[in-house]
Image (cartoon, rainbow, N blue to C red):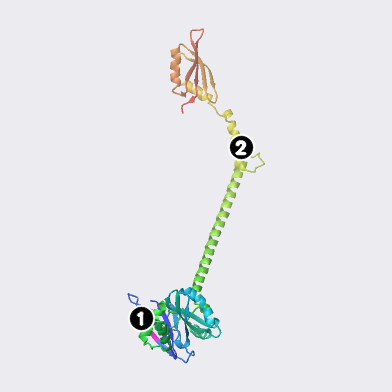
Amino acid sequence: MSKTVLLDLRDREISCYTFEKSGKNGAPEATFTSAVGEGLSFDIARPSGDFEESYLSLPLSLLDFRVLELPFSDIRKIKELLPFEIDNLVLGGSGSVAFDAYILDRSEGKSKVLVAYVPKETLRTILGRLKASGMDPRAVISIELAEAVNSSSSADEVAGRLLSPEPLDEKARMAAALKEMASPTVNLRRGEFQYTVDDERAKKSLIFTAVLACLLLLVFLSDSAMMIISTTRHNNAVRAEMRKTYQGLFPTEKRISNELYQLKAHMKELKDKESSYVGVSPLRVLLDLSTVSRPGITFTEVTTDRDSIVLKGEGPSMTDVQKTKTELEKIFTGVAISDTKPSSQNKTLFTITAKGRKD
């Protein structure tokens, strides 16, 4: 449940209304206590319990009024012009009073404005006493002024009610107070008396948010720094292991600047020499030929290199050579009879080529 306190300052007493929202519909219920004082010499204890905010209502006896006719209907422009008007009306000028305005009537671009003001020293004294009691009103209003404005139909009638206000019973005062707290007719907490608690809370919230953001940024930067350090250490360890492995592969090489680049250079060099070390195995070819059924066929020359096998020999006839070719196709790829010719002993000389084993 939320509580709101209204301090209703009167001529010889001050009433403290406590509005509390309760029930399903949140309708406010009010209680009040009173303290007696003489003029501004009053004492009031802070209301019991916690409350979210407080308001202060001043009596008409502490306020002065003027009804001005101005060539504006915009309240913002009116409030900008008021200090210059008050300088001509108030001894000490606008700098000596706290003031606010309410538009009573608008017609043809003009307006009649009620100006209410109170000496700054008076308001400063009252707010100081309340602050000493632990209260800082959100707004300084006037229940009697609001009742006079809301109960009148013309500027002249408002002036008459302000000069001779009608007394209000407690129930009417509480109803008027509740309405004024929701939407003040005038609020004298302006300028140097401006209510700043919300601004201070917002400022503290922004400061807290900024500090939290800085802490999060610090954590992020710390984590990033640890990640960079860890990655650097890992890279250094990998590089040291690479150098150790490289030195084991090439112990005679003393000048090492980039292990990976130099290893690629050695690999390229070995690849260029690959043809000198890799090729068709002659022994394997001879073993394969020993398994080939070749009646009457004799191989007189077997030549192997990286890409091919060349078989030369002689046989009884061309048919036998064809049969041998068929047998060789079971073992080798790309088998072909490249040359045949008759010999002096009524045999057929042949040359068969193959590309490699079927694996």
Q: Which residue is mark 2?
A: 265
Of the pair 97 and 81, the residue shown nearer to us: 81
Q: Are marks 1 and 2 in contact (CB under 8 Å)?
A: no
- Residue 233 to residue 355: above or below: below
Report the span colored magenta.
28-32
Q: Under tag 2, what secondary structure? A: helix
Q: Quadrant of residue 259?
A: top right
- Crowd tier of the residue under label 1, counting other residues whose Cα lies within 10 Å: few below 14, some 14–19, many 20 or above: some
Can you give x and y, in whole percent of width and height, for residue 354 in the image? Answer: 49, 22
- Name the residue rendered at 50%, 20% in the picture: 353
Going by the numbered disc 2, the residue's amino acid type is Ala
Q: Which residue is mark 1?
A: 29
The answer to whether residue 119 is magenta is no
Of the pair 343 and 102, the residue shown nearer to us: 102
Q: Under tag 1, what secondary structure? A: strand
Q: Earlier in the sequence, mark 1 or mark 2?
A: 1
Of the pair 12 and 26, the residue shown nearer to us: 12
